[in-house]
Image (cartoon, rainbow, N blue to C red):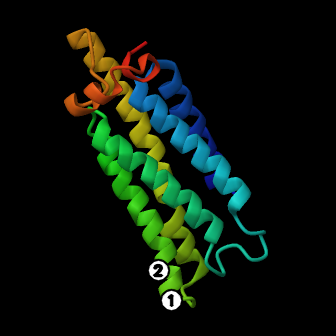
Amino acid sequence: MWHVAVFLILLVASVGYAFWRGGTPERIGAAVVLGGTLGSFFAVSGAHARWLNLETGLLIVDATMLAAILILVVRANRLWPIPMAALLIVQVAGHFLKTLDPQIYPFLYWLTSSLWSYLVTAILIVATHNHRRRLKKQGQDASWNASSRRSLANDPAISREP
């Protein structure tokens, strides 16, 4: 179970760093990652049946995370949500692979459905670091693309940087 410890260390580091030093998109991304992790904890099947059948609860959690990150892809003035969304697409596709081939080995199902979570946390760390670098270099880092800024202008909790 060393891989769980590694993931939890990455999770705490990435979410903590994003909440502490990230802009609004990074904080939203951190909330999505943290919510998805907690949701996965409660949605996964018991150890005796895990990965043997379609993990419907995990599919719902992963699809919800994907939808939230896709909103960031469209609205945020950031590139990092794009590779994060791509990894989440692969995760969701892993669930559909199990639907198409119920005999798929449990390890392969786990691999296609979970491995990408490690990279998602790494992307969040890099995204937060890049945000801090842009702030230091340019003095500002707009959170939202131009069309989103107009629609979010009346919501000070979303449109302003800390």
Identify residue type, mark 2. Leu
Work out whether 51 lies above or below 130.
below
Identify residue type, mark 1. Asp
Q: Where is residue 141 in the image (x, y as percent from the top left)?
A: 27, 19
Q: How many marks?
A: 2
> Residue 97 bears which disc, if any?
2
User: Which residue is at a point 78% across and 69% down the rendered structure image?
Assistant: 46
Q: Position of residue 87 (x, y in %)?
A: 39, 57
Q: Do the residues labelled 1 and 2 touch (CB within 8 Å)?
A: yes
Q: Please tell me whether mark 1 sits on a helix, a strand or a loop.
A: loop
Q: Where is residue 71 in the image (x, y as percent from the top left)?
A: 37, 45
Q: Is 32 placed left or right of 79 in the picture?
A: right
Work out whether 35 lies above or below 43.
above
Q: Is 13 placed left or right of 146 in the picture?
A: right
Q: Give the residue number, with chain letter if any, for mark 1.
A: 101
Q: Position of residue 32 (x, y in %)?
A: 52, 42
Work out whether 45 lies above or below 67.
below
User: Which residue is at a point 64% across and 65% down the rendered structure image?
Assistant: 57
User: Which residue is at a point 49% across and 50% down the rendered structure image?
Assistant: 118
Q: Which residue lies furthest to the top in this view?
A: 139
Q: Quadrant of residue 34?
A: top right
Q: Please tell me whether mark 2 sits on a helix, a strand or a loop.
A: helix
Q: Is 93 placed left or right of 49 in the picture?
A: left
Q: How far apart are marks 1 and 2 (CA)?
A: 6 Å
